[in-house]
Image (cartoon, helix red, strand yellow):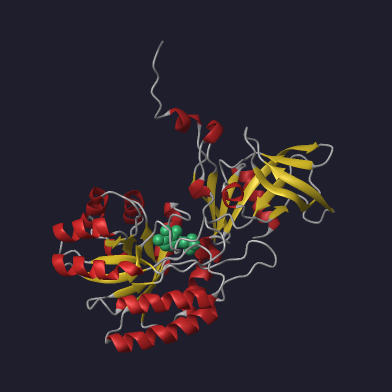
């Protein structure tokens, strides 16, 4: 988006504010579906934990997307956004049998990732088709925070436990209609993904009533200059070929499913903040903005680098700044980063602020969570109000002493 447009939005809606460019979400969705246009039945289920605003959900629904959910609340949000139950897959981890039963009663596709619940659910509801999440033990990406397929991960049922799965399925007579993996949040290498896919194909052969295979996500998007990006077009070609071969072998045209979050919504987002103070110490120049990790935790939690642009002075001379927040805690967004010269009052735009930014925000320091704006058809639409003091106090119960 243009710096001027973003500046105007910051003026009109105040700061801090999240802005999402609808056009980018649409083009990413189309990029993914075109890469797999030789697959007969393709399903993209948007992983809505990345950015769960109901208007974003409705936009994705209008494109033909389904929904990947990880909690009963996300299921309800999806239904409220107009998704049909059968367009929603529910992929929780470590939730109670009660919550899974509740989701099943709403008619959504259940995905189970542990043997204990599989056996209990199958015994109680043998007629409800279930997908199984396996752990192929593939380490994709280098950061253990985001690699969920390796040997001691809490996600999925180990492929070494397939005999056990088969015993449960046989004993309960339950129907397994899907097989799933999600190996982590950063696939650096297509070959790693294809290798994991082979394991999923091997696993799929054990189940005769499959309707779909879900290859999860982990598509990488660039955050900073020089970052690798998943070559989705090449990946599409290679996996399509393998998938179509497999369907022939299996004797049925299965649905190929993905559940991307970051790929669809990371790059659409801009987080606009105002510089309150420029503080020169003996060694560093700090730019202190009207935000903190209460609004954007990824740099502190994952060490992720969001590009920061001074949209108030895009052509100014570059200088080095450490960009930090205003909460009473170390909340560093960037260390000694080259940014166009900053004056107090300038607006800084954080890029890649669509995925896992607002959805991870909190009220720490009793600050309000920001507003959210969707930029669509050259118009800025408010899709979430900034919180007010009422939101901070509304569930608190006062005791008089
Ligand atoms: C979070 C999640 C995703 C989305 O991952 P991205 O890296 O954002 O694409 C997909 N599937 C499951 C099960 C998830 O938990």
Residue 44 seen: yes
Q: Which quadrant holds the C terminus?
A: top left
Picture quarter containing residue 89?
bottom left
Left or right of 370, for residue 273: right
Residue at image x 54%, y 50%? 357
Q: Which quadrant holds the N terminus?
A: bottom right
Residue 173 seen: no
x%, y% of residue 222?
62, 65
* Residue 42 against residue 279 in the figure, above or below: below
Left or right of 62, for residue 266: right
Left or right of 58, for residue 113: left
- Is 355 or 182 nearer to us in this picture? 182
Left or right of 70, for residue 32: right
Residue at image x 39%, y 59%? 155
Mark count? 0
x%, y% of residue 38?
42, 85
Residue at image x 35%, y 65%? 158
x%, y% of residue 197?
42, 76
- Is 202 or 218 nearer to us in this picture? 202
* Residue 80 against residue 42 in the figure, above or below: above
- Is 45 or 135 nearer to us in this picture? 135
Image quadrant of ligand 1 equals bottom left
x%, y% of residue 337?
75, 52
Residue at image x 46%, y 67%? 217
């Amino acid at each position: 988006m243009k710096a001027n447009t973003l500046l105007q939005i910051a003026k009109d809606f105040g700061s801090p504010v999240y802005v999402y460019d609808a056009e980018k979400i649409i083009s990413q969705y189309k990029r993914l579906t075109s890469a797999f246009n030789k697959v007969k039945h393709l399903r993209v289920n948007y992983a809505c934990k990345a950015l769960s605003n109901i208007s974003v959900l409705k936009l994705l629904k209008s494109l033909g997307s389904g929904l990947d959910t990880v909690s009963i609340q996300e299921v309800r949000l999806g239904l409220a956004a107009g998704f049909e139950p059968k367009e929603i897959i529910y992929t929780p981890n470590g939730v109670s049998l009660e919550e899974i039963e509740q989701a099943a009663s709403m008619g959504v596709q259940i995905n189970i990732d542990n043997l204990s619940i599989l056996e209990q659910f199958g015994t109680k509801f043998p007629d409800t088709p279930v997908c199984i999440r396996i752990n192929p033990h593939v380490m994709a990406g280098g950061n253990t925070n985001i690699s969920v397929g390796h040997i001691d991960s809490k996600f999925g049922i180990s492929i070494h436990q397939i005999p056990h799965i088969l015993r449960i399925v046989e004993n309960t007579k339950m129907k397994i209609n899907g097989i799933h993996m999600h190996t982590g949040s950063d696939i650096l290498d297509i070959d790693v993904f294809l290798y994991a896919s082979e394991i999923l194909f091997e696993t799929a052969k054990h189940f005769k009533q499959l309707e779909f295979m879900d290859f999860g996500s982990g598509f990488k998007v660039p955050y900073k200059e020089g970052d690798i990006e998943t070559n989705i077009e090449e990946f599409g070609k290679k996996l399509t070929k393998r998938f179509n071969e497999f369907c022939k072998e299996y004797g049925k045209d299965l649905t190929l499913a993905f559940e991307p979050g970051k790929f669809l919504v990371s790059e659409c987002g801009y987080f606009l903040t105002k510089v309150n103070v420029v503080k020169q110490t003996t060694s560093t120049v700090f730019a202190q903005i009207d935000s903190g990790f209460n609004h954007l935790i990824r740099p502190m939690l994952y060490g992720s680098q969001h590009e920061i642009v001074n949209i108030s002075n895009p052509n100014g001379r570059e200088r080095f700044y450490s960009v930090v927040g205003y909460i009473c805690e170390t909340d560093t967004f960037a260390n000694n980063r080259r940014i166009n010269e900053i004056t107090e009052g300038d607006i800084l735009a954080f890029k890649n602020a669509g995925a896992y930014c607002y959805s991870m925000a909190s009220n720490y320091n009793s600050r309000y969570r920001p507003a959210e704006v969707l930029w669509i058809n050259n118009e800025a639409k408010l899709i979430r109000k900034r919180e007010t003091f009422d939101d901070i106090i509304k569930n608190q119960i006062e005791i008089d002493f």
